[in-house]
Image: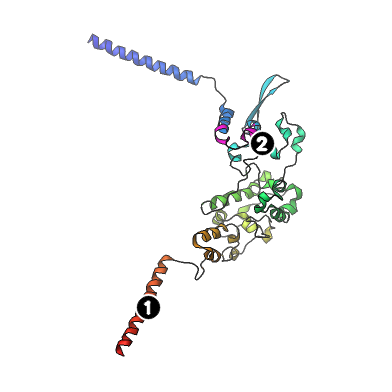
Amino acid sequence: MAKFSRFRIAWVTLLLFAFSFGFFLLVAATNTTPVDTSVNAEKGQENSTFSKHKNSAENEKCLQCHGQSKYSYFNKESKRKIIKKMYAELIMNRSVFYESNHREFKCIDCHSEEYLGFPHAGNLRMESQPNCLDCHGEDEKYAKYHFENIEKEFQSSVHSEKHSDDFTCWMCHNAHTYLITARTSENIKQTISYDNAICMNCHSDFSKYQLLTNRQTPNLIKKHDWLPNQKLHFQAVRCIECHTKKINDSTLVGHNILPKKEAVKRCEECHSTNSVLMASLYRYKIKEIRSTQGFFQGILVNDSSVIGANRNFFLNIVSVIIASIVIIGLFIHALFRVIKK
């Protein structure tokens, strides 16, 4: 009995020791001096994820400050390290930038090289932002996008006429984040959501809307109260389909924003064989049909029923059966007439 008691005491002592040692390790781990991993983590992510982009190392000179919510520098006057909060509008998300159309650019391709020095000179804030034609205009590499035609359409729009030089490409297309992809059946909903968000960026944000006008931000739901099935329309159609006028067919997206009184309101303009949607938003469908069903079908079929152009597998079978019965009937009828003679 005494031997069993000593054996039990030994096990209890061992368990207490193990528990105490584990508790000590836990306390030691929690009391370790915290390390600010916000910058290090993002730098590590940059090295592993974004290094495939040819100018990522060069851009990191800017993103080491503008890529997170805070930045630090050494103040030579006070001889100490200063940590400050980065202004929200000056923060550039690496993931978003390296998914955008301009991901292979260097920051100093668009911004002055003087920004590479710190502190930045105050007059650099007055630097004018380049517009699309500064890079894309009269360049054979970008000719297929017809930027010159887009510029002409924009100059005719209410955005340009009412706001003049205050309204630039940047108002809708942030060069750091802008992303455009070819529309397909798989991504059409995402395309609609993305493009409508560009409009909502100002038209549903009072602080941004007030940068260009003193009028009150419009209530878009109330303004469109005439539109049946509002929610469905907003999900399936882009704002620009009803609020733009295409000057030519060389561009998929119209930039001539019309006055509200000239916006599309008649149902048949969209819900018809000559739908404006098939010339813009759903234009990709014609190409898809041509590639799968041939050129003739692509010309005739615009998401509507065209007699003689649309085929149905089961109707094809029924029509063959009926035709066969008619031919057999005619043959039997002719055979009986020959026998009677």
Residue 262 vs residue 271: left or right?
A: right
Question: In what element is the residue under mark 1?
Answer: helix
Residue ID at (73%, 54%): 155
Residue 209 seen anywhere in this rendered image of the structure = no
Judging depth in this view, the residue of 5 and 287 nearest the camera is 287
Q: Does 183 appear above or below 79?
A: below
Query: Label 1 belongs to which residue?
Result: 327
Query: Label 2 belongs to which residue?
Result: 90
* First in sequence: mark 1 vs mark 2: 2
Q: Which mark is residue 50?
A: none
Residue ranking furthest to the bottom: 341
Q: Does 203 appear above or below 37?
A: below
Q: Does 86 appear above or below 241?
A: above
Front tag of 1 and 2: 1
Q: Distance between the residues labelled 1 and 2?
A: 78 Å
Q: Does the magenta-highlighted stretch encompass residue 204?
A: no
In which image quadrant can residue 62 be found? top right
Residue 235 seen anywhere in this rendered image of the structure = yes
**Quadrant of the drawing holding the C terminus:** bottom left
Residue 308 vs residue 195: left or right?
A: left
Could you tell me the amino acid type at mark 1? Ile
**Quadrant of the drawing holding the N terminus:** top left
